[in-house]
Amino acid sequence: MRKIIHIDMDAFFAAVEQRDNPELRGKPIAVGFDGPRGVVSTASYEARTFGVRSAMSMAQAKRRCPQLIVVSSHFDRYKEVSRQIHAVFHEYTDLVEPISLDEAFLDVSENKKGIELAVDIAKEIKEKIYERTSLTASAGISYNKLLAKIASDMRKPNGIFTVHPDRALDFIGGLPVEKLWGVGPKTAERMHGMGVFTGEQLRQISREHLVQVFGKMGNVYYDYSRGIDNRPVIVSYERKSVGCERTFLEDLRIESKIIIELYHITLELVERLKKNDFKGRTLTLKLKWDATTQITRSLTQEKVLRAKDDILPLAKQLLKDTDYHNRPIRLMGLSVSSPETNEKEGQNRAQWIEGLLPFEEKDFVT
């Protein structure tokens, strides 16, 4: 049985800003762009008491907390602190799976220091992080990634929570289904319509019925409700896409401006492809009309898409297949992805792709 630790830094971006700017300590702050289209990247715990949350529009955040202080992001600084934190992880194990700058999974089943209890390792890691960065972290401990991640959120900030194997079913049974990995708002709404609100209620649904309703994810939900998650800690991922997107201060309505922005995003994408030495043959265009409505179009080619002259004509072709003439554009994005999935399905033509695309957070252009 594995021993998995999930470390999650507490309000990471905001905490770094407060650490480096004493005048911000103890005050409600939000990290992000302070503009009409700004979104909260991270909120300090002082701001969270007013209901300010990540991904909330900055305008809504200010309404909830009129005294909110908005701080611009400093990603180079966050990356440097993140390197310090990950260096601590590797003092205990090389089985480290980074999730983002501020969180990671660690498999400490066998660890470099020969410490028997995972909770003791988590305590040492938290102490070292604080000693070296003056920042606090929360830790979740269990026998798999699902439960470790849920556990790390149970006693935030600066807490430790362990889900023991003999208590896992009771723990999951009492959780709202929204706490389970992969259950977003729409899935939760569908489950609620089935009369399923907790892990215990989800456990009463047969695997066959869950697959009938949710497709392949039905198998995952069936296992999760029983505390089953056999995914290993993965040290490295194969990059499957490179993309960038822009949210505009004002909606784009004029065709010439739309084409100019598409051109600039193409140039940015080309630079990112070169930087990451990424080779892909599927181009995807993403458009958002308003806060809730977005579409994506995708096209796969025979050759690798690397140069502007390869990508821009395809991007224009995809744009023509949308309703951009009649609807103002709030956000525009492009990504190049590996074509394996398309090849398996024999798709080499323009197609609708529903849902969110795997744009890397660090590749966003805002």
Image (spheres, rainbow, N blue to C red):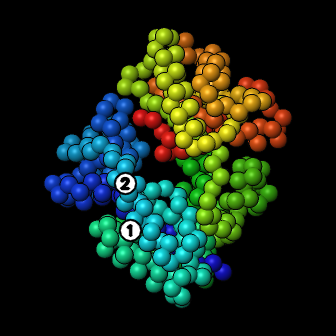
Foreground pick, 196 / 248: 248
Quadrant of residue 321 in the image?
top right
Mark 2 = which residue? 78
Q: Quadrant of the N terminus?
A: bottom right
Q: Which mark is residue 222?
A: none
Residue 154 at x, y percent in the picture: 44, 68
Using the numbered discs, state the Cα–Cα distance from disc 2 to disc 1 in whole angstroms: 15 Å
- Element on which disc 2 rests: helix
**For the residue carrying disc 2, how many other residues have a C-alpha within 10 Å: few (<14), some (14-19), or many (20+)?**
some
Which residue position holds label 1? Answer: 137
Amino acid type assigned to the residue bearing label 2 in the image: Tyr
| Residue found at x 53% / y 34% | 271
The location of residue 21, given as percent across then percent down, is 20, 54
Q: Is residue 343 left or right of residue 328?
A: right
Residue 204 vs residue 97: left or right?
A: right
Q: Tell which circle, 2 or 1, labels the residue nearer the N-terminal end.
A: 2
**Foreground label between 2 and 1:** 2
**Is any part of residue 273 visible from this angle?**
yes
Task: Give the residue type that dot 1 points to.
Answer: Ala
Percent position of residue 333, x then y: 54, 30
Q: Identify the residue at image location x=65%, y=52%.
A: 238
The answer to whether residue 44 is visible is no
Q: Is residue 352 above or below residue 147?
A: above
At x 46%, y 14%, the residue is 257
Residue at point 55%, 26% (across, down) = 266
Snapshot quadrant of residue 272? top right
Q: Nearer the viewer, residue 209 or 223?
A: 223
Find residue 101 and report its image quarter. Answer: bottom left
**Neighbours of disc 1 within 10 Å: few (<14), some (14-19), many (20+):** many
Q: Secondary structure at mark 1?
A: strand
Q: Position of residue 306 (x, y in %)?
A: 63, 32
